[in-house]
């Protein structure tokens, strides 16, 4: 298990000038995807956003934020970062190679959660112990980083604060490749949250629904403690009935 505190940073976030503009593709425009579209465009990033329908269905979000609405298979084109934020059950419906057009080495974030009783129905592999994000990674054919899955969307929208501010919320980030994780850490920090290294993707179950960290607005120390306390066994509420 490799759980680490975020590195100390000189840069503040949210109210400070960002380091550079990134091309970001977002697949999914629900509560989390839509919120990230709003926040990341607010920070000056070039965002292409899509849903499961035609781009014109996102015309209001595009007009509000300045993001470019595109078809889902166009969102990752030449992107520095891709975010997949859709219902877990819809993951197999994504087009083959959906994120392949991103820039070489560009990380892919996935924010999904498996809600078997509440929305998704039974997914056999997850029920049998495959971590949710590992299952997503296998379906999209690319390594992913798990983050933003456990924060309430309104808190993601409103509660980001500069680095060092009292009460700053920490968000766990699970994933394998160090360079990609550094980019993801930077985005989390820029949005106003403390990124915490939650270990490899194989241990991303530590932040799944039903774990001690899920849905909590913990700081760094409490986030690390909660991750360590997690069990890979799914609790009854989060298993298929």
Image (tube, rainbow, N blue to C red):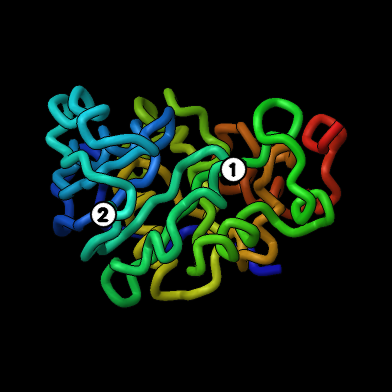
- Left/right of residue 12 with respect to residue 126 in the rendered view: left
Q: Residue at x 18, y 27 (%)?
A: 59
Q: Quadrant of residue 235?
A: top right
Q: Residue at x 39, y 40 (%)?
A: 28
Of marks 1 and 2, which one's residue comes earlier in the chain?
A: 2
Q: Secondary structure at mark 2?
A: helix
Q: Note whether 152 is above or below 207 in the view shown.
A: above
Q: Nearer the viewer, residue 19 or 146?
A: 146
Residue 8 visible: no
Q: Nearer the viewer, residue 148 or 4?
A: 148
* Image quarter hosting the C terminus: top right
x, y (%) of residue 53? 34, 35
**Dot 1 and dot 2 residues touching (CB under 8 Å):** no
Q: Secondary structure at mark 1?
A: helix
x, y (%) of residue 177? 49, 75
Q: Residue at x 71, y 68 (%)?
A: 1
Q: Which residue is mark 2?
A: 74
x, y (%) of residue 187? 33, 53
Residue 30, label in figure: none
Q: Which residue is mark 1?
A: 88
Q: Quadrant of residue 210?
A: top right
Exactly how many numbered labels are in the figure? Answer: 2
Crowding at mark 2 (Cα within 10 Å: few <14, some 14-19, many 20+): many
Q: Note whether 181 is above or below 36 in the view shown.
A: below
């Amino acid at each position: 298990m490799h759980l680490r505190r975020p590195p100390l940073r000189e840069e503040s976030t949210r109210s400070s000038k960002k380091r550079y503009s990134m091309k970001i593709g977002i697949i999914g425009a629900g509560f989390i995807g839509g919120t990230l579209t709003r926040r990341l465009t607010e920070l000056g990033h070039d965002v292409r956003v899509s849903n499961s329908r035609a781009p014109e269905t996102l015309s209001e979000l595009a007009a509000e934020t300045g993001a470019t609405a595109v078809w889902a298979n166009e969102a990752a084109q030449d992107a520095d970062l891709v975010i997949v934020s859709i219902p877990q059950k819809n993951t197999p419906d994504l087009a083959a190679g959906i994120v392949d057009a991103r820039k070489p080495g560009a990380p892919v974030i996935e924010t999904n959660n498996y809600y078997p009783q509440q929305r998704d129905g039974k997914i056999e592999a997850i029920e049998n112990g495959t971590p949710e994000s590992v299952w997503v990674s296998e379906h999209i054919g690319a390594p992913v980083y798990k983050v933003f899955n456990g924060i309430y969307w309104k808190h993601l929208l409103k509660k980001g604060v500069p680095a060092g501010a009292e009460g700053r919320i920490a968000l766990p980030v699970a994933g394998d490749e160090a360079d990609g994780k550094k980019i993801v850490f930077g985005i989390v920090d820029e949005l106003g949250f403390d990124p915490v290294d939650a270990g490899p993707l194989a241990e991303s179950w530590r932040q799944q629904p039903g774990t001690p960290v899920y849905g909590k607005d913990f700081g760094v120390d409490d986030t690390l403690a909660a991750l360590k306390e997690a069990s890979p066994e799914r609790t009854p509420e989060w298993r298929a009935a």
